[in-house]
Image (cartoon, coloured by chain):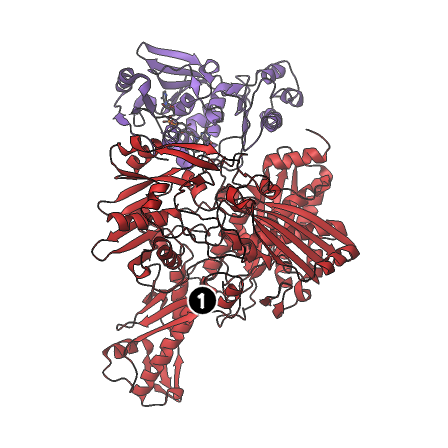
Amino acid sequence: MIPAAFDYVRAGSVEEALAALAEHGDDAKLMAGGHSLIPLMRYRLVTPGVVVDVGNLNGDLRGISVADGTVRVGALTRHSELEHSAELADACPMLAHVASMVGDPAVRHRGTLGGSLAHADPASDLPAAVLALGATLVARGPGGEREIAAADFFTGFLESVLADDEMLTEIRLPVSGGGWNYQKFNRRAQDWAIVGVAVAENAKGVSLVNMGSTPMRATAVEQAVAAGASAVDAAALAADNASPPSDLNGDAEYRGHLARVLTERALKAAGIA
Amino acid sequence: MTITDDTAGIGSRMLRKEDGALVTGEAKFVDDIHSPGELWMGMVRSTAAHARIVSIDVSAAQDMPGVEAVHTGAELAAMELWVAPLPCAWPVTDDMANPPHWPVAPETVHHVGEIVAVVLADSRYAAADAVEHVIVEYESLAAVASIDQAVADTEHAHTDLGTNKAYTWAIDEDPEGTQAAFDAAAHSVVCRFEQQRLIPAAMEPRGVLALPSPMGGDVTLYSASQVPHILKVMAAATTGIPEQKIRVVAPAVGGGFGAKLNINPDEILAISLANRLGRPVRWTESRTEAAGSTHQGRGQTQHIELASDSDGRLTAIRVKLDADMGAYMMLITPGVPLLGSFLYHGVYETPKFSFTCEGWFTNRTPTDAYRGAGRPEASYAIERAMDMLSYEVGISPEEIRRRNYINGGEPFEMWENPAGIFFDSGHYLPTLDRALDMADVAGLRAEQQRRRDAGEVKQLGIGMCTYVEICGLAPSRALGGLKYAAGGWEHATVRLLPTGKVEVVSGSTPHGQGHETSWSQIIATKMGISPHDVTVLHSDTAISPLGLDTYGSRSLAVGGVAISMAAEKVIEKARLIAAHQFEAAPEDVEFEAGSFSVAGTPSKSVHIQELGFVAFAAHDLPDGLEPNLQEQVSFDPPNFAFPFGTHVAVVEIDEDTGGVDLIGYFAVDDCGNQVNPLIVEGQVHGGVVQGAAQALYEVAVYDDQANIANPSLMDYLVPSAAEMPSITTDFTCTPSTTNPLGVKGVGEAGTIGSAAAVINAVVDALRPHGITDIDMPATPMRVRRAIEAARGGAS
Ligand SMILES: Cc1cc2nc3c(=O)[nH]c(=O)nc-3n(C[C@H](O)[C@H](O)[C@H](O)COP(=O)(O)OP(=O)(O)OC[C@H]3O[C@@H](n4cnc5c(N)ncnc54)[C@H](O)[C@@H]3O)c2cc1C
């Protein structure tokens, strides 16, 4: 529980952060809320030589705006800000709701949307939400800015398409109407989901938490729903292309069962199938 | 619940004196105390459960910045830092196996987490870095990773012993009679319950700081301990440092639950190294480290059989325990199951009773006391088994209890139980009636039936438990009879200071219980003064030289009684001074609400607080009376105390996911007279949650190589307020006959009642599936699998 030695750089701007990343390469790690990075460092599971703190950056990087049918969320927006935003409650209520289901109040006060996505933990809530909502992620690097579809973002366990010298700056989501639902099954309020299911009608998205090595879409369910299947029939396919982990909270078979139960509940609650 | 601060004495809901410092962060814990030049210990811990140490390479670690020294176990032994292994104070049988437990393993390790080398460095970070660079080569030996494996006895946790069995202990006067009762029984049940291992997880981890005083050659040890007095004696015996040279201080201590009543390797290392090096030595455990280095709780396989007549009246109980000692006998490891041994018949009369416990070594972290220590296990077994008997007989769980309560549920005093001990007092039926009423069990049953009939996904379960516990440890003679090395008295000093204020010195050592408040209230009532005129001193062997500390719900029933008795002695001496002032005979002087007066002459009176200065100045004391008003008492209780109560738990089970929600909890406890009902309720609340935690959440998981799989609080699930319902409490009052205050003790009661109540509720919800038992913790997966199995296949 004692991290190894590291250098600390507090970035005053995105440019400074990118410069520090460029200088130190894969020896550097961005830190936003620190609520995933610091635990890993304390267990010495990661030992960055340099921590580049972007947690205090403000401006466009932190906050929510809605215009022209698009919701823009700065990557450094805290979970608690998503949870309590009146604009978001209107324009993309599922994201606000899912944010309110993350951890406990202290975690939500520090953790950021960008950090949660960049961390790419299949057990996290927000990645599944942005997948179901059909979000676009905006990253900046030495070569400038690029847009990445959420569906293309997650590549492996705690891995994404982000390069070592890139930083997420913004998340864009279509203003959503229609039904939605998020089912999170865990044992204690503060815990990660044993399994979670997010359903968003207008993006035609169904996504799964903790059902594989990445946050993932339940494509078989999506297709069945699109083809007019009932909630029961569509949900039966929830675990079809999943390879869920086995751990102390549940083995793969139980997770598959939960995915089917929760998908059925989510589809019914969202009024989609 | 109303909270008042009416500054009254015994019986008032006075706010705790301790809480201001605790909630504002002013209280100083061991980790808050620093000393210039201090060295941090970093423990190199075994990654193997059972292995011979082939070599330890400390060269790289030794050269790292900030590192003063790195010592292996063999080196430390050669340095003669200790003269004896870590102590076990409770050799329960003459032939109990007790392999030496050295603070640092010299040759062979017996559990993951055992210390094999110690780094001394100038910061915690430098120590942690160096620990990573110590290279240990092990030659593995077969590890005993479970109780089943220990009982099979083919591989041995201690190769030299040639067996895993540590001892056999029995209360079994008439085994044939018990068997005959089973042969003749109309109904019987045979149950096997697992008491899973628990990680105590107190809010403050353990930590030590040893300060040498090179000139005087003595050492002060600050330790997050519940037992500074016992630690002082044992540290002397273990290190060879003369006892009068050792001072032990337990500053603010953030919970213990038994896990801080041991004599730990780190404590001995700190005191011995500080003494040797002449420098302060410190250590604070990390959470992950705590999972393997601080003792764990429970760890038993229980076999319990009940026999009854056709009405469900018990005719015999037979119990066989297989208790997991872990790798070594720590301070009271072997005795923990025995603390429950007298209670496996619970609150029920049974003509025949047979109890046998076998203690087994495994290659896992040692077990020892954890809130309730042996008694939650006992009440779980009998209360679960009674429910199972009720299914057999076909009557309700409350009915089977009513039919079997001691003395038919009517009040009793000094009832001799089948194990030959005397229950001081009891009156069980009212706690059941009140609990059923408070919970509205009739209404709940109707709702349960409605949901069953409607085939709803969320089903209700209602469970109950009537527990009795043995506490107020303990009559010294009884402890001697059980081969416990020490006594069970408690010591107290009460002094009336020159200015009329009172100092109380407590031998029992608080670590969250609120002694400062309760003891002040006792003084307030006894001496007729404000509780705010009282200061309670404790937890420092230089201030409180005599004491036996806090565990086993003993503080009030033994220590609090000693305070009360010492206050009476002060009053008696003050009466002599008052009589002298009044020129009256002491027998004619009355004491009422703090004032002495002469019977029939109320105009002549003096307040006891005024006599503090009179006794101090000593200008005009009765002939032969010593100056000062300070009195001491060592109270050795004539008997244990036996609190009891009935708890009702209500759960909702999502049959599709298997998720269990504890949605209601109703506790009716009887701990005799209450000094502070607010503190009593707090103890019940915390205790209930700790038992419910065992029922639904907590388990120390070991893999087949005896590695602990969930050492962090991310995976070891301690429930929070969010998972718990609001707990409804009520009380009956059956005063103890063991002590003049009529008090019993309540620190462990909640835990002793709640695990059984919660699991009885879970099984009650699942009864329509034909399910009669489920293991703890009743995790969603386990519950779902039980439903699937009962339905005859997967979902
Ligand atoms: C007790 C606890 C409970 C939790 N419970 C939950 C839960 O129930 N559900 C859940 O989803 N999460 C949970 N979390 C995780 C929490 O939501 C984290 O805050 C979040 O996952 C990461 O956000 P962060 O801002 O703290 O990221 P950090 O920890 O600062 O960073 C995480 C990773 O992302 C990278 N990174 C951060 N920001 C950027 C960026 N802008 N661009 C590129 N890379 C970046 C970092 O380099 C690092 O690798 C919990 C955390 C804790 C401590």
Chain letter of the residue carrying label 1: B
Instruction: Residue at 43%, 18% (x, y): give it.
Output: A159
Instruction: Tell me which corner region of the image, top left, top right, bottom left or bottom right, holds residue B791.
Output: top right
Where residue B724 sits: x, y (%)?
52, 45
Relative to A256, does residue B91 appear above or below in the rendering? below
> Between B518 and B505, which is closer to the camera in this rendering?
B505
Mark 1: give few (<14), some (14-19) or many (20+) Cα within 10 Å: many
Query: Is B196 placed above or below B332 here?
Result: above
Asked whether B30 or A187 is in front, the reply is B30
* Residue B5 appears in the figure: no
Chain shown in red:
B
Asked if residue B590 is positioned above or below residue B665 in the image, the reply reads below
Indicate whether A8 appears above or below B672: above
Q: Is residue B467 left or right of residue A171?
A: right
Residue type at the position of mark 1: Trp
- Residue B20, horizontal then vertical, whole percent: 34, 54
Q: Which chain is purple?
A: A
Report whether residue B644 is seen.
yes
| Residue of label 1 | B489
Number of marks present in the image shown? 1
Which quadrant of the figure contains the N terminus of chain A?
top left
